[in-house]
Image (cartoon, rainbow, N blue to C red):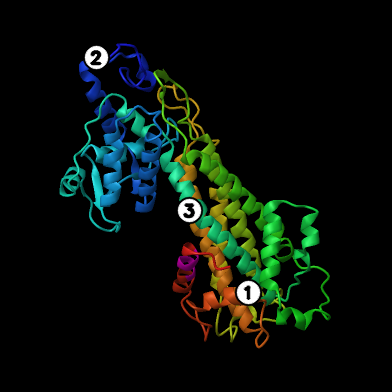
């Protein structure tokens, strides 16, 4: 009303910021922004990520620095409570000025356009947003000045991916420690490298925690007692002996990403920002912190998977498995046992290594070179999700082999923590009685560790 020039309120966007918009066109400006920016392509994001992004966007708008009416937040929350989920294509965001395209698809549903899925089953056919909102008794929002820009200027989609990913990655990390302990037992390894004294003199937090968990998992092992005094090996291979150092660095990387995420979850990330009666332009929408954290997590999970595959190789290789049959088959030759489990794991690790190339350094200028350095946060998010799924399956393959290896050490019992992991595995995968189709076994374990940590 003052007539002062304010970016995105009565001006165009990006390179078009010098274009002044007439007072009578301010509503049209915001609607046009949403419609024109809904340019995402590719597969839809999972409903859980869309819901998380909606929740985070509502949280940002509530902070009072965005300059929107409360009705925008109220209607967004009403959509969440009614289970109305916008169909948001996965690709099309460079991560600055925020996740423009993905958030535009959410905003499109909020104003009664676009398509949505009602409920939590992604296989249900989509429907028009206007129809879904009317059926739920929710009025579409008519955007006022700045509200369209405030909605799509932010990092909430990539942050949603990272927050959910970190939850699953922590479950996987603890499970990977459990799988390592199981492999140590099956391979007649020694727990000496996990002694507290070793890690107290190099006290990286993740390393100390990994060693502690390994000691607890291997405690009271009958298998260890059986070969304590007659083992000619002085030291185990790195994939066993250095597990605390390697998995510890993975945990430290997850902790770094979590600190970044916790800040971003409650940050004001749009532009311009309102401070009392002053409108200030800045760059909090830039997703570099999140993109970088996603890349770090991707590299860490690739490391976790690579270490797991190396232990798996030792379990199935008769030259390395301390007397167990080739590929843990009961009748090697006639049966192939777990030969393909290691090959599958190797394929997943190789793919993950290609995906571990950082996205956050791959800037391509956009918007007529106005947005000339961007973080590619959604590319980082896509790769991180793929690598997490790969790592879960690699660890599942190791669990499958580790449990089978323990069958060959019976009647001796492993350490108390390993017994617990073994029992969890055996609850979904019975011992082998000859060759069997491995895919459903690997997927069953992957589903299990996707829900909870096994250690």
Label 2 vs label 1: CA separation? 70 Å
Dot 2 alpha-carbon crowd within 10 angstroms: few under 14, some 14 to 19, many 20 or more: few
Q: Residue at x 48, y 66 (%)?
A: 446
In the figure, 365 relative to 350: above or below? above
* Front tag of 2 and 3: 2
Q: Going by the picture, which residue comes out furthest to the bottom?
A: 411
Look at the numbered disc 3 and give the secondary structure of its residue: helix
Q: Quadrant of residue 331?
A: bottom right
Query: Which residue bears the numbered disc 1?
Result: 418
Left or right, 12 with reference to 272: left
Q: Residue at x 43, y 46 (%)?
A: 160
Sequence-wise, which precedes: disc 2 or disc 1? 2
- Front one among 299 and 455: 455
Magenta span covers which residues?
Answer: 445-449
Label 3 vs label 1: CA separation? 28 Å
In the figure, 194 relative to 126: above or below? below
Q: Residue at x 61, y 58 (%)?
A: 304
Sequence-wise, which precedes: disc 3 or disc 1? 3
In the drawing, what numbered circle is on residue 22? 2
Look at the numbered disc 1 and give the secondary structure of its residue: helix
Left or right, 414 with reference to 356: right
Q: For the N terminus, give its image quadrant.
A: top left
Dot 1 alpha-carbon crowd within 10 angstroms: few under 14, some 14 to 19, many 20 or more: many
| Image location of residue 406, percent across then percent down | 63, 80
Left or right, 131 with reference to 221: left
In the drawing, what numbered circle is on residue 386? 3
Left or right, 62 with reference to 143: right
- Front one among 297 and 94: 297
The answer to whether residue 358 of the structure is visible from this angle is: no
Q: For the C terminus, give its image quadrant.
A: bottom right
């Amino acid at each position: 009303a003052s007539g002062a020039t304010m970016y995105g309120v009565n001006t165009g966007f990006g390179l078009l910021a010098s274009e002044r918009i007439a007072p009578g066109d301010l509503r049209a400006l915001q609607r046009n922004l949403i419609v024109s920016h809904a340019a995402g392509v590719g597969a839809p994001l999972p409903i859980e990520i869309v819901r998380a992004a909606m929740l985070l966007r509502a949280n940002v708008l509530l902070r009072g620095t965005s300059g929107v009416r409360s009705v925008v937040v109220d209607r967004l929350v009403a959509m969440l409570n009614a289970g109305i989920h916008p169909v948001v294509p996965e690709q099309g965001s460079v991560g600055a000025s925020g996740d423009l395209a993905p958030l535009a698809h959410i905003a499109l549903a909020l104003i009664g356009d676009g398509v949505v899925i009602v409920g939590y089953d992604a296989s249900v056919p989509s429907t028009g947003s206007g129809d879904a909102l009317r059926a739920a008794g929710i009025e579409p929002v008519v955007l006022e000045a700045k509200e369209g820009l405030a909605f799509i200027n932010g990092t909430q989609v990539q942050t949603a991916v990272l927050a959910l990913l970190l939850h699953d990655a922590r479950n996987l990390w603890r499970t990977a420690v459990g799988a390592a302990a199981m492999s140590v037992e099956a391979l007649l390894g020694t727990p000496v490298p996990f002694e507290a004294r070793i890690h107290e003199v190099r006290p990286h937090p993740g390393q100390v925690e990994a060693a502690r968990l390994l000691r607890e998992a291997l405690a009271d092992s009958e298998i260890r007692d059986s070969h304590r005094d007659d083992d000619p090996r002085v030291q185990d291979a790195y994939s066993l002996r250095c597990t605390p150092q390697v998995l510890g660095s993975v945990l430290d990387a997850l902790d770094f990403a979590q600190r970044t995420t916790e800040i971003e979850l409650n940050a004001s990330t749009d532009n311009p920002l309102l401070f009392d009666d002053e409108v200030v332009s800045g760059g909090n929408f830039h997703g570099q912190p999140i993109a970088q954290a996603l890349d770090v997590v991707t590299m860490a999970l690739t490391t976790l998977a690579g270490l797991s595959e190396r232990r798996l190789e030792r379990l199935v290789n008769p030259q390395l498995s301390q007397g167990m049959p080739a590929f843990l088959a009961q009748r090697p030759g006639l049966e192939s046992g777990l030969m393909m489990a290691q090959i599958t794991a190797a394929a997943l690790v190789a793919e993950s290594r290609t995906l571990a190339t950082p996205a956050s350094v791959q800037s391509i200028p956009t918007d007529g070179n106005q947005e000339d350095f961007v973080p590619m946060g959604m590319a980082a998010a896509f790769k991180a999700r793929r690598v997490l799924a790969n790592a879960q399956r690699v660890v599942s393959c190791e669990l499958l082999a580790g449990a089978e290896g323990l069958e060959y050490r019976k009647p001796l019992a492993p350490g108390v923590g390993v017994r617990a992991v073994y029992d969890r595995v055996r609850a979904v995968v019975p011992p082998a009685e000859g060759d069997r189709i491995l895919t459903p076994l690997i997927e069953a374990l992957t589903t299990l560790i996707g829900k909870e940590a096994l250690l």
